[in-house]
Image (cartoon, rainbow, N blue to C red):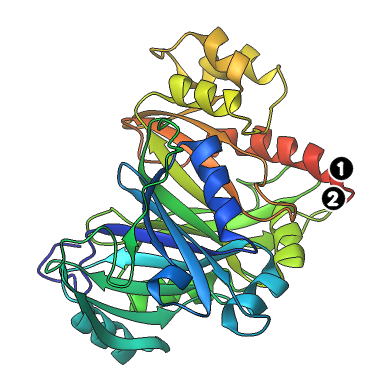
Amino acid sequence: MNSNTDFLPINGTDYVEFYVGNAKQAAHYYQTAFGFQPLAYAGLETGLKDRTSYVLVQDKIRFVFTSSMLAEGMIADHVRKHGDGIKVVALWVDDARKSWKETTSRGAASYQEPEVKSDENGEVVTSGIHTYGETVHIFVERKNYKGAFLPGYVKWEPEFVPKPTGLKYVDHMVGNVGWNEMNTWVNFYAKVMGFNQLVSFDDNDISTEYTALMSKVMSNGNGRIKFPINEPAKGKKRSQVEEYLDFYGDSGVQHVAMATDNILETVTDLRNRGVQFLTVPGSYYETVLDRVGEIDEELKSLSDLGILVDRDDEGYLLQIFTKPVQDRPTVFYEIIQRKGAKSFGKGNFKALFEAIELEQVKRGTL
């Protein structure tokens, strides 16, 4: 899709907002464990009475953690139903009014009509639409704004600032949707947002002896936004997507993939900070080079850290997945380094899902 026909040009991911039970503690965890840097704050001290938000940044990644200050209301209800989870996937656009008009005219349900907020640093225009489950997309137009984050937020400058871990940008975000809903949402992103389908995986591609799922990857015109959409498929036992849907209580964002330029250094740092990763069987490394060919990294270094490798026509990629980062087995993270590859690690699916099944056995949810 060229820019002449792209009715919804998107510059990138603006921010990802989590509704959580305790924003202060969540922010501390993401600083300490993942190396995110303090950016902005909004709460009682800034005149808010209903919520508190902490904004963290690492290179081009912005995470917002928001908690309710009230027993009732949208945020409290979201956390009660889903646990800690992603509410907003915000997209950086040049024209938030046009983005809202283009998507709602094509069938999107409006979440927020265009709204202008301003302070001494300028103005931001935002608008929003609903997508799967209770997840929403907020369009953010910030070309006339010079502040730290958004109007209503102040700089957050705590004394405790752990170093970054080398995370660069959001590579892709995966949504889990219910039975037979994948094509509904694939069509939504195609029709309402003008996305193209990059690749499709069926239950023959993504299956083990026990579980299976299906996935299609949707991407915007310039390729900066990639949204794989997963749905369950029939298997002997309960798949990871079914487990997610059961514990999240709805469709939602399953994982965020964050890119790094040096996965060996990043994962070593994350492990040293207490981040827990899935581990694949050691036998994976006995044959991986037969499948992917020559790579720059030493196989032992990858094996020691549990990093997976896959190759496509354009190069190879290195990837690893954390365990869920909250008590419910819902949201987790992927750390990815692309060395030319544009794909999503199809060759690793079987080993990865067997590793997930081992965790499901421990949880008694397989």
Mark 1 residue crowding within 10 angstroms, few (<14) / some (14–19) / many (20+):
few
Neighbour class for label 2 at 10 Å: few (<14), some, many (≥20)?
A: some
Mark 1 or 2, nearer chain start: 1
20 vs 325: above or below = below
- Residue 219 visible in rendering: no
Left/right placement of residue 190 relative to residue 300 reads: left
Query: Which residue matches tag 2?
Result: 366
Where residue 55 sits, quadrant-wise, is bottom left
Asked whether 191 or 166 is in front, the reply is: 166
Left or right: 128, with 205 as reference point: left
Left or right: 83 as drawn, with respect to 300: right
Amino acid marked by disc 1: Val
Which residue is rendered at x = 54% and y = 29% of the image?
270
Are the residues flagged by discs 1 and 2 in contact, CB closer than 8 Å?
yes
Residue that mark 1 sits on = 361
Per the model, the C-alpha gap separating discs 1 and 2 is: 6 Å
Determine the residue located farthest toward the front in the rendered image: 45
Q: Quadrant of residue 14?
A: bottom left
User: Quarter holding the N terminus?
Assistant: bottom left
Q: Residue 143: give x, y in percent of width and height.
A: 13, 66
Residue 77 percent coordinates (x, y): 66, 79
SS at circle 1: helix
Residue 137 locus on image (x, y percent): 40, 73
Rendered location of residue 103, percent (x, y): 31, 83
Q: Residue at x 38, y 30 (%)?
A: 166
Amino acid type, callout 2: Leu
Q: Element at badge 2?
A: loop
